[in-house]
Image (tube, coloured by chain):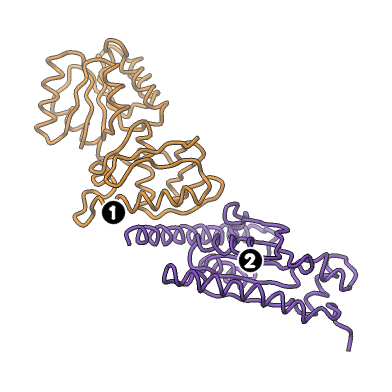
Chain colours: A purple, B orange
Amino acid sequence: MKESIYGDHRPAMEDVMNIILGSIDELRANMEEQYLTDPVEHCLGRIKSETSMREKCVRQNLPETTESALNVIHDAIGIRVVCAFISDVYSVRDHLKNMDKVEVVEEKDYIKHVKPNGYRSLHLILRYDNKYFVEIQIRTISMDTWAALEHHIHYKKAASENDKLIIAELKRCADELASTDMSMQTIRDMIRKEL
Amino acid sequence: MKLLLAEDTVDLNKVVTEMLTISGFDVDSAFDGKEALDLALKNGYDGIILDIMMPKLSGLEVLKELRERNIVTPVLMLTAKAEVDDRVEGLDAGADDYLTKPFAMKELLARVKALTRRGRDYAAKELSFGDIILKSESLELISENTVRLSLKEFELMQTLLLNQEHTVDCNYLLEHVWNDAEEVTEETVWLYVNFLQGKLEYIDSSVVIKGEKGGPFQVVVNE
């Protein structure tokens, strides 16, 4: 068997992933106590598979080495947090940024600055303990729904006339979902204010 | 239905005001162009009747000023028979109809009814204010990002934008956006104002809706 592209780092990587997942669990418990509701709908962590990582190295013209996998590519450890409401996305982000031993390498807010195709999500790249990079995607249920369904629709991203229509319609769906997302947020905020 | 009548001939103003009031309209009367413009900027109307020859500001000047400020309220111009150029210029400047003096009251009433009936169809396909664009065909509210509004959200936003020069009270919104539907209250208006406020923030706009629960409301650009 070929040696792992992650060398002997895998157990340490799993530890980092679990520390971050554990810290999110802690936030969930605290917020549930305070507001009686869990801000996180679900949360997934994964170590990128050997195959995917090697393919990504090849795609990016990188040597298939541990150095490439851990230090050049930043999503060997990936976590996706799916939240109930838009404001919860930012609570989770703030919590992660304030964690011990965590340094924010990059933050991309595709909720404030939506991608042209309609994709909305908040992306963070963190570095834990000056060592492992972790890519985190935080978004609401409806943003996740759109991303998941869009992924299922196999259309050519290079635009023929017909694809242009599909791209525009997918964007319309994203903007409609976003509108509803904000309405639900407004309703929750009003109820919280009244309580 | 609220109308603004601007006519400097006192007697004629009085007769027309009475006739329109009897026909169920709520009428504000102005006696010169300046007064008419001030009223039109301060209040929302469903229709405006402008005499073309008036002291201080002519009807044409008032009309141009209104259209320049995005106020698309339907306008009926009253002109003298000889003034063909005025009629043409009035229509060019954004008047929706004209009537030559002397006119029959019946005809004026019929034209005013037709004018206000058309009402909302007159609204532009696209309204802009500050850093936002509101598109009536797609119900899109656009700034840095875009959202698609629901129909009532759209109508509320449109009404606020068409009345951007002044505040709009709850009753006006209940009448014009919700057609005085029975189950709709001040609470509904407040919820929808909040929906729009949230969405303005969400598209990263600097436009906000000012006002407390119960109104009145106005769109403003937050510096």
Per the image, the residue denoted by label 2 is: A137
C-alpha gap between disc 2 and disc 1:
36 Å
Q: Amino acid at mark 1?
A: Thr
Per the image, the residue denoted by label 1 is: B188
Q: Residue at x 62, y 71 (%)?
A: A80
Residue A105 to residue B107: above or below: below
Q: Position of residue B200 (x, y in %)?
A: 46, 47
Residue A24 to residue B37: above or below: below
Q: Position of residue B198 (x, y in %)?
A: 44, 52
Q: Quadrant of residue A42?
A: bottom right
Q: Nearer the viewer, mark 2 or mark 1?
A: 2
Element type at marker 1? helix
Question: The residue marked by circle 1 belongs to what chain?
Answer: B
Q: Position of residue A45 (x, y in %)?
A: 65, 76
Q: Quadrant of residue B214?
A: top left
Direction from residue B30 to residue B204 in the image, left or right? right
Direction from residue B35 to residue B107 in the image, left or right? left
Q: Residue at x 88, y 84 (%)?
A: A3
Quadrant into which the N terminus of chain A falls: bottom right
Contact between marks 2 and 1 (CB within 8 A): the answer is no
